[in-house]
Amino acid sequence: MKKSIITGSTLVLALAFFVGSAMAGPAAKFAAAWSNTPKLESVVTVSGDADDVVTQSKNGWTIATIKVPQDKELLVGLSAEIGLVTDTSVRGKNGGSAKAEADAEAFVNIYAVPTGYEGGPIVGERALPGQVMLSKRIQTLSATLGGVIQSCEDTTGGEDVNGLLPGDEGYIDTPDGVIDIALECLVTDEEIGLALDTTAAHHFNFILPNMNAGEYDIVAIFSTGARAEIDICDDETDWCLAMFDADGEASASATASAIINKYVMTVQQVRAVNSDLFTEDAIIEIIEP
């Protein structure tokens, strides 16, 4: 990720995360939790003619309980509908430049902890392969805008009736046959924008290998994050050096939102074949001859 939105989310005091769940009894080999209620919406908006950035993150948890015999694996499946909204726009005239960026994301971590989890710090085993990004989008819009010319009148720059030139004492503006847009035209802002609003279902499988016998709470820690930034080109040393125009005017706005909609978490007690669990080294790059 280009810039971090969320830090330390797995060790925070998680927010209450309402869930209609079906939790198996102590001897069950399957457990599940689900919800139809949207939760954990992170949303930010920033707008103006000066550099600015706003971020927000929210965290929540859901839980299913299962009893495990000695040396068994747990297979955890997590499916969730993720809604992302990114909206950016740039306004300007007379060669003004600006950039707007909207960043929205949702991710999840799965843990096995002793039963009785109530939303405090996580003390337990994190399921492999660790944190998984369910959905993410970074949208950037940058533009240099000339504006909309409403009318122009040549009134300046010429030699006046007394032969004086611009800058001479007593000089009176006269036409010079050349239109200076910044000084002699009425120009209104030009604006461009881009908005994306998507909802999609995502799924990922997690594994908890070689679990000791006992009863566990399987906890899913969900996180959403949103970041909105605007960057105005107002200096020759800025990112827009090649496009900088001292006469330019620009402003921008950005909105970002991420939300968890419906989700289902399932937990199954399984046994790996001959205890053979592949590691991250199982993918070997194929070198073309």
Image (spheres, rainbow, N blue to C red):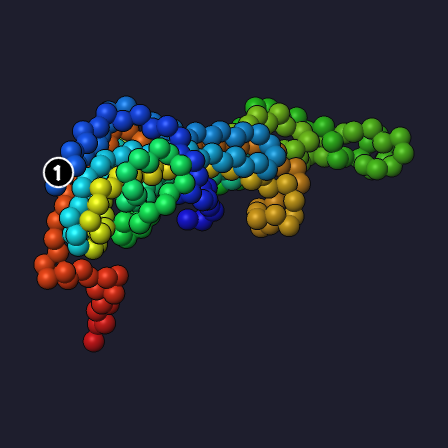
Front-lying residue, 121 or 53: 121
Q: Is residue 168 left or right of residue 98?
A: right
**281 over 25 or under it: above or below:** below
User: Is residue 221 toward the left or the right of residue 153 in the image?
Assistant: left
Residue 28 % position (x, y): 12, 38
Q: Where is residue 253 in the image (x, y as percent from the top left)?
A: 50, 31
Left or right: 39, with 160 as reference point: left
Q: Mark 1 points at which residue?
A: 28
Q: Which residue lies furthest to the left in this view?
A: 273
Occupied quadrant, residue 112: top left
Which quadrant holds residue 278?
Answer: bottom left
Q: Which amino acid does label 1 sit on?
A: Ala
Is residue 64 visible in the rendered structure shown here? yes
Crowd tier of the residue under label 1, counting other residues whose Cα lies within 10 Å: few below 14, some 14–19, many 20 or above: some
- Indicate the secondary structure of the residue bearing disc 1: loop
Q: Quadrant of the C terminus?
A: bottom left
Residue at 35% across, 33% down = 118
Give percent across and percent down for residue 246. Answer: 66, 41
Nearer to the camera, 64 or 280: 64
The residue located at (27%, 52%) in the rendering is: 128
Residue 148's spot in the image, x, y percent?
A: 53, 28
Q: Which residue is drawn at 54% across and 37% down?
A: 53
In the current view of this chain or complex, which residue is farthest to the right?
169
Residue occupying image coordinates x 31% and y 35%: 116
